[in-house]
Amino acid sequence: MATTRPRRIGILGGTFNPVHIAHLRGALEVVEQLALDELRLIPSARPPHREAPQATAEQRLAMVELAVADEARLKVDDRELRRDKPSFTIDTLESVRGELATDDQLFLLVGWDAFCSLPTWHRWQALLDHCHIVVLQRPDADSDAPQALRDLLAARSVSNPQGLVGPCGHIAFVWQTPLAVSATQIRHLLAEKRSVRFLVPDAVLAYIQTHGLYRAQTDS
């Protein structure tokens, strides 16, 4: 009897306020580099380290669903929107891990800045008990990791992201194509009644226009 190989599941959290091409292109690059079976985009409801998003949770979820509708390898996971408390990554990892087979591989994608702030995260030292951490590194990253992370990297990092074996426990870096696009930039453009076409998928742009999102306060 043939044995089933472990699944390779990635997760990428964020406010996605709104989701844009840098989110999506970066996600797709990781899917291909790490040969993931799927990558789940997980919109956060009440991010503990940020102000409340301008768009509602339901609107942000709808935009992400529209953005990935034609890409089978990218999925949307709404578990944080169904949780009636702040969105701590460790809670999400425990929840996802509980649904997977013991030997399935789980990959948490984080940007360099987020990785450097890891020691401020809730129960951050338990993250690697549930996943591998994949740091999305851009060539223009200029901040240094704190000492606690340098010690962790010395013990847990692997040089080749394709070499992440086992269900969890290691850290690897994936170089990303630099796309100078941010949700903040997109919101500012929309507030100034300027075009954001080609910065977000067409379906997302149509949703923003239909629902009048991200207009200047004087327009609301």
Image: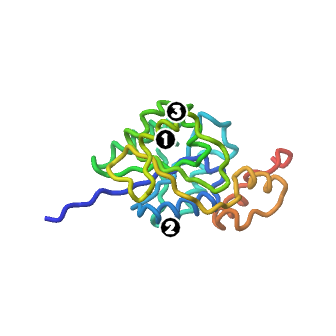
From the viewer's perspective, tell me whether residue 105 is left or right of residue 193.
Answer: left
Residue labelled with disc 1: 82
Real-space CA distance between mark 3 and mark 1, rounded to the nearest whole angstrom? 33 Å
Residue 71: which disc? 2
Q: What color scheme is it?
A: rainbow
Q: Nearer the viewer, residue 104 or 218?
A: 104
User: What secondary structure is found at the residue carrying circle 1?
Assistant: loop
User: What secondary structure is found at the residue carrying circle 3?
Assistant: helix
From the viewer's perspective, tell me whether residue 45 is left or right of residue 38.
Answer: right
Residue 167's spot in the image, x, y percent?
33, 48
Give amino acid for label 2. Answer: Glu
Residue 168's spot in the image, x, y percent?
36, 45
Residue labelled with disc 3: 148
**Residue at point 51%, 53% (across, down):** 173
**Residue at point 42%, 40% (across, down):** 155
Residues tagged 2 and 3 counted as in contact (Cβ below 8 A): no
